[in-house]
Amino acid sequence: MTDRISRGSAAVTTTLGAALLVGATALPAAAAPTTAVVCTSATAGLAEKLTKDITAALANREGTVALGVYDRSTGTTCTLNGTTAFDSASTVKVTVLATLLWDAKKTNRYLTDTEADLAKAMITESDNDATSKLWKQLGVAKIQGFLTAAGMTKTVPGADGYWGLTQENVEDEQKLLKLITAKNTVLSDNSRAYMLKLMGQVIADQRWGTPAGAPSSVAVHVKNGWLQRSTHGWRVHSLGTFDGAGHDYVISVLTQDNSTMDYGVAPIQNVAKAVHKALVPTTPGVTRYTPTGSPREAFVAVPPRG
């Protein structure tokens, strides 16, 4: 079984079958860290409920899971393994878009039609060619400049054009999502609205992960990523922002050491369901989001046989 994914493009030469993509047995997973979920809240009883429910959602899991939850409306925060580093896979595309908009703001210009087309394809379809073009256009120096401005001090851009190997952690991803969802001096209001618009238009088979269980009364914005390599098995990640029904919250879940993609998707969605249910209890007439049963993402730019 071999796979090769070229630098800076979506070109793939592979003998991986469809079964491997969505459920065949792969490498054995490593034991999960023993770090406990920690939640705090200004709302009585909410931290205890979230701690209990998230812990239950991750019970008997192998592999590594890191998560962050932040709800402005209730002053609620949850974290697990917040500083653990992961290969970013396609979640870095949110950072690429943020860098593009941040850089344009510095010269007080609008995106070109080409940039707008690339940005839309990169986020809504997770297009790798579009990402590679924007990554090359921006260059690592500008991407690092945005990371510094955003306070994302532990995120390290992937070297040699391998943007899918950018190192990220939950703490930094939560900083990014907070910037996107509240007024700040790094991203303009128009930039933030544009990012949320694109993350709200992600195609159906990529709207899995953190949206699972979100009530119909909140707006959903998401960007996911997955990557399989010879070490740490499948990395499966999901970033989401949610607003409505009196709430304004963000969720980041990063995982690795998964035996299959589905095995990585499951804990993300179990955590998401627990968070949505605790923050926005179901009321009559409100349905909850059921994500696709066949989650897909795009192979990202990594070295061959990595």
Image: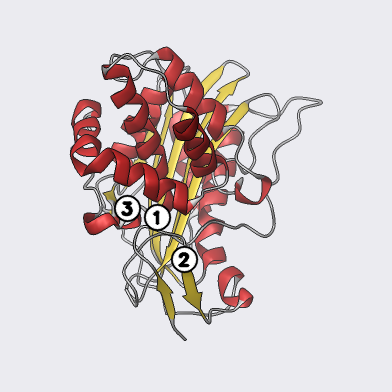
Q: Is there any visible trace of residue 160 in the rendered image? A: yes
Q: Is there any visible trace of residue 72 in the rendered image? A: no
Name the element at disc 1. Answer: helix
Amino acid at pointer 3: Trp
Q: Which residue is mark 3?
A: 163
Question: Is 163 placed left or right of 130 in the picture?
Answer: left
Q: Quadrant of residue 276?
A: top right
Q: Residues within 10 Å of mark 2 (few under 14, many from 20)?
A: some
Which tag is nearer the camera, tag 1 or tag 3?
Answer: 3
Q: Position of residue 54 (x, y in %)?
A: 48, 45
What is the CA distance from the residue labelled 2 to the residue labelled 1? Answer: 15 Å
Name the element at disc 3. Answer: helix
In this rendering, the answer to whether 63 lies above or below 100 is: below
Name the element at disc 2. Answer: loop
Question: Is 101 placed left or right of 71 in the picture?
Answer: left
Q: Position of residue 263 (x, y in %)?
A: 53, 65
Q: Residues within 10 Å of mark 3 (few under 14, many from 20)?
A: many
**Residue at (48%, 59%) from the top-left corner?**
59
What is the CA distance from the residue labelled 1 to the residue labelled 3? Answer: 8 Å
Depth check: give the residue in front, 285 or 236.
Answer: 236
Q: Which mark is residue 11?
A: 2
Q: Quadrant of residue 21?
A: bottom right
Depth check: give the residue in front, 300 or 69.
Answer: 300
**Residue at (37%, 15%) from the top-left corner?**
188
- State how many labels appear: 3
Amino acid at pointer 1: Ala
Q: Which mark is residue 89?
A: 1
Amino acid at pointer 2: Ala
